[in-house]
Image (cartoon, grey):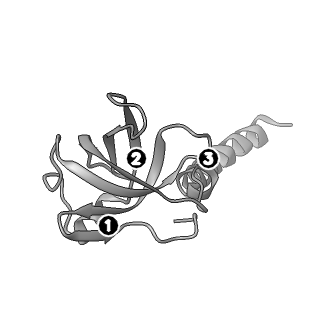
Amino acid sequence: MSIRTARRLVLCGLLIAPFLIAGVAVQAHHAVAGVYDLTKEVVLEGKLKKLNFTNPHASIELSVPDKKIKGKVTDWKLTTASVQTLTREGINKTSMKPGEVLKVTILPAKNGSPTGFIRNVQLGDRNILLFFGDGTD
């Protein structure tokens, strides 16, 4: 193989690689069905520790008291919709404040860890649906 041919192959590889990597990242980003159990819904009520109002998905940390063991609290890390979706639903980074009690319905993690994808959130008298897809959203 000549040096000219080798350079062309390297150049082609450099031009194609970003598209291949982007495709993998998009697939991983949209793997809700791969991580969360779409057949189960769990209702959690607890105090908001933190709201991460960032893309591609916002998230919250929620401290949920155990109903069976007095004094035990589990910290849940919950992913939700994009900032754009939240904003469209009237939620912004000051809508939920640390210490505020939230009630959320989640799709729990398949591996049993205290993580989940928020399906809807109750803010005051509003019940806001944030996820209604088939796991490919």
* Observer able to see residue 56: no
The residue that appears at 57% across and 65% down in the rendered structure is 136
Q: Residues within 10 Å of mark 2 (few under 14, many from 20)?
A: many
Q: Give the Cα separation between the discs numbered 1 and 3.
A: 25 Å
Residues at badges 2 and 1 in contact (C-beta under 8 Å)?
no
Left or right relative to 9: residue 71: left
Numbered disc total: 3
Judging from the image, what secondary structure is the residue with disc 2 in?
Answer: strand
Residues at badges 1 and 3 in contact (C-beta under 8 Å)?
no
Hey, which quadrant is residue 31 in on the image? Answer: bottom right
Which residue bears the numbered disc 1? Answer: 85
* Observer able to see residue 126: yes
Amino acid identity at mark 3: Lys
Front position in the image: 82 or 74: 74
Label disc, if present, on residue 105 of the rendered structure:
none
Give residue 59's position: percent from left, percent from top.
34, 47
Judging from the image, what secondary structure is the residue with disc 1 in?
Answer: helix
Q: Give the Cα separation between the discs numbered 3 and 2.
A: 13 Å
The residue that appears at 56% across and 49% down in the rendered structure is 25
Which residue bears the numbered disc 3? Answer: 110
Judging from the image, what secondary structure is the residue with disc 3 in?
Answer: loop
Amino acid identity at mark 1: Thr
Which residue bears the numbered disc 2? Answer: 78
Front position in the image: 22 or 131: 131
The residue that appears at 38% across and 55% down in the rendered structure is 80
Closer to the chain start, of discs 2 and 1, is 2
Closer to the chain start, of discs 1 and 3, is 1
Q: Give the Cα separation between the discs numbered 2 and 1.
A: 16 Å
The residue that appears at 29% across and 58% down in the rendered structure is 83
